[in-house]
């Protein structure tokens, strides 16, 4: 039997914030959804979220989860998606990491994080939300649904988005036409103030793919 810390959530006196810090220490590395949105009034917003992933290839669907703030209110990103039903997810990389971190600041509604972080908004093809010029990959999404996991502070509001248009900078492509990870230089979120690079990698050939096995 494994020894060590055992936390029964039905009996612990730890707060959800205490547990949140623990979760972030072992649910890692986490990809970052750098989400660009626009409100009904035209206000633009840009903010990073590390509860993010792609959950379907056909149809192509991504999810990310902006939690309710400490007052139990929706963050600007969630408010905008509820109003307009669309968003853009840009890829966070080593080259734009500082600017991405700057956009995590909670500015008053209506303040443009693009301007505050010195970033360049570009028009998208199918949505009103803006692309991030400084990111090598931007995906335009239409909201499929939002699943609320609660109404108290910290409760996740899981946004499902149908991918409509994908923008990829040719500079990050390899000779095979696929993304070259050494050129992309994506980053991931860890616990506390830590991030991780994706340079240290190893390969395992899947046993489910006989075509890729030797012998």
Image (cartoon, rainbow, N blue to C red):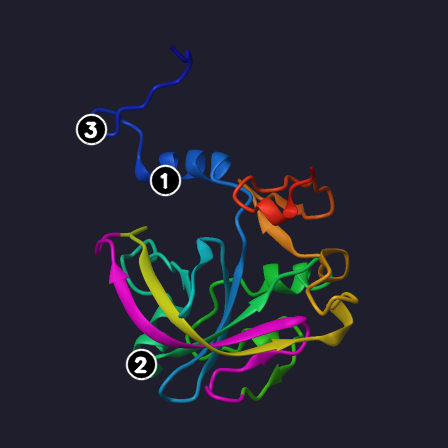
Q: Which one is earlier in the sequence, the residue at label 3 or at label 1?
A: 3
Q: Which mark is residue 10?
A: 3
Q: Nearer the viewer, mark 3 or mark 1?
A: 3
Q: Which secondary structure, mark 3?
A: loop
- Closer to the chain start, of discs 2 and 3, is 3
The residue tagged with tag 2: helix, strand or loop? helix
Question: Of the numbered discs in the image, which one, if any, rests on residue 83?
Answer: 2
Separation (CA) of disc 2 from disc 3: 37 Å
Q: Within 10 angstroms of label 3, few (less than 14), some, or many (20 or more) residues?
A: few
Quarter occupied by residue 173: bottom right
Magenta stretch: give its range.
125-152
Residue highlighted by disc 1: 17
Q: Is residue 203 magenta?
A: no
Q: Nearer the viewer, residue 42 or 90?
A: 90
User: Is residue 150 left or right of 177 when viewed as pictured?
Assistant: left
Percent of width and height locating residue 200: 73, 42
Determine contact: label 2, label 3, CB under 8 Å. no
Q: Is residue 183 above or below residue 210?
A: below
State left or right for residue 12 relative to residue 163.
left
Q: Residue at x 31, y 35 (%)?
A: 15
Residue in the image at 54% along x and 57% along y: 32
| In-front residue for pair 12/175 | 175
Residue 9, x across and y down, in percent: 25, 29
* Residue 56 x, y percent position in the rendering: 41, 62
Q: Residue at x 37, y 77 (%)?
A: 80
Residue farthest to the front? 215
Residues marked 3 and 1 touching at CB (< 8 Å): no
* Residue at mark 3 to residue at mark 1: CA–CA distance: 15 Å
């Amino acid at each position: 039997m494994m020894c060590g810390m055992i936390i029964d959530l039905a009996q612990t006196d730890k707060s959800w914030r205490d547990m949140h810090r623990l979760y972030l220490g072992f649910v890692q590395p986490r990809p970052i959804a750098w989400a660009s949105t626009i409100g009904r009034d035209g206000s633009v917003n840009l903010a990073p979220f590390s509860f993010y992933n792609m959950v379907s290839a056909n149809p192509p669907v991504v999810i990310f989860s902006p939690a309710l703030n400490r007052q139990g209110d929706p963050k600007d990103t969630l408010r905008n998606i509820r109003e307009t039903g669309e968003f853009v997810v840009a890829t966070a990389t080593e080259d734009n990491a500082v600017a991405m971190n700057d956009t995590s600041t909670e500015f008053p509604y209506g303040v443009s994080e693009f301007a505050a972080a010195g970033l360049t908004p570009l028009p998208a093809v199918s949505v009103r939300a803006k692309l991030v010029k400084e990111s090598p990959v931007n995906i335009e999404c239409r909201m499929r649904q939002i699943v609320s996991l609660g109404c108290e502070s910290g409760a996740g509001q899981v946004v499902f988005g149908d991918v409509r248009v994908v923008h990829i900078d040719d500079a990050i492509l390899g000779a095979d036409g696929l993304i070259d990870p050494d050129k992309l230089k994506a980053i991931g979120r860890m616990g506390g103030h830590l991030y991780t690079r994706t340079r240290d990698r190893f390969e395992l050939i899947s046993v489910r793919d006989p075509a890729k096995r030797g012998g």
